[in-house]
Amino acid sequence: MDPDTLKNSWALVAKSGDEVPLFFYSHLFLSHPELREMFPVSMAAQRDKLVAALGAVVSNADQLDQVTPVLAQLGRDHRRFAVVAEHYSAVGASLLATLQHFLGPAWTQQLAAEWAAAYGLVATVMVQAAEESAETSPAWWPAEVTGVERRTLDVTVAHIRPAEPLPYRAGQSVAVEIPQRPRRWRYFSPANAPRSDGSIELHIQLVPGGQVSSAAVRSLREGDTIRVGAPVGEALALPADGRDLLMVAGGTGLAPLRAMLEQLDHGWGGTTPNVHLFHGARMPWNLYEHTQLTRLTRRPWFSYTPAVSDDGSYPGQRGLVGTVAAAYGTWADRVALVCGSPAMVAHTVSELTAAGLPAANIRTEQFVGGPQ
């Protein structure tokens, strides 16, 4: 394969913007109408995700050893949508047809062979990962909603109990499908360490324009049955060497960090490291775990600093949480765990590195997924 040829041709196609996914999905659904039901009823939020992911990954197929973990996770993830090996052929055919349409005369037999070979490698990794996963775990777990707390104006805490044990560790996330929004999976992090009764807390924040978050915050009810995907994520974890921790959370990015705090409080790994948590929110009432976290400061190993960005009258720390954390002290000897929106994470990482915290000591997590 010629990686430069793949990347250059994809760059040309990408210039056509929204027309690319529109053509791709039209071709896919016309040639394989049975696949339409695997996608959300509204394609507004979905239409560019698969095409962009395919283009970016396939055009970097020469670095397959570096992207294999991502591809493997994509393959396992797609089991939630009942994707099987035959579907990859349909998607590949529509991808090639899309490339041919937008490249026009530049689409040659040699270029077609390059793209077919690259897509074949990608699809093989994904299919093999899915098949291996199917031998040890279900595609998803049904779970009952056992309680719903409207904690603030825009945060709901959902208590769920999977029908079968869901093996996860503190810091991981799971994809969730709620009955109010079928086929729209979203990632949420359990806010508690694994419990003997299998119960899980999910912290759900209302996102402007978010179809899933709005339905979950406003409409999820006790007794509903949701679907929960296999746990994912490796970056957010308690360091095995017991090093002291700096935790920085924005909004419900607090959830995986709270799960790790619960694990520490239950005596994980012998000596408990020192932990300083910064939780940022726009307004004071969005500090939805303030009482619980303040109570936890009774532990000698735990410190907690809330930060509010949009209320000038707030008596505590004001400003973006990443800026507050970076200016608070010297963290060079700590491992930093950062979780929140992409913008919050990027800003916090920038602030911490500028303050002298080595980038190698900063852990963040990003997830990739299928139709959502």
Image: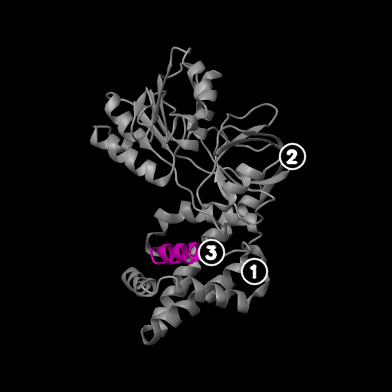
Q: Is residue 5 left or right of residue 153?
A: left
Q: Nearer the viewer, mark 3 or mark 1?
A: 3
Image: magenta residue range: 46-60
Task: Tell me if label 2 and label 3 are in contact, CB under 8 Å.
Answer: no
The verdict on residue 22 being magenta is no
Mark 3 belongs to which amino acid? Ala
Quadrant including the C terminus: bottom right
Residue 44's label in the rendered image is: 3
Image location (x, y in percent) of residue 152: 55, 33
Quadrant of res 218: top right
Q: Tag count in the figure?
A: 3
Quadrant including the N terminus: bottom left
Q: Secondary structure at mark 3?
A: loop
Image location (x, y in percent) of residue 93: 54, 76
Q: Nearer the viewer, residue 217 or 12?
A: 217
Quadrant of res 359: top left
Mark 2 belongs to which amino acid? Ala
Q: What residue is shown with label 1?
A: 36
Q: Is residue 335 left or right of residue 40?
A: left
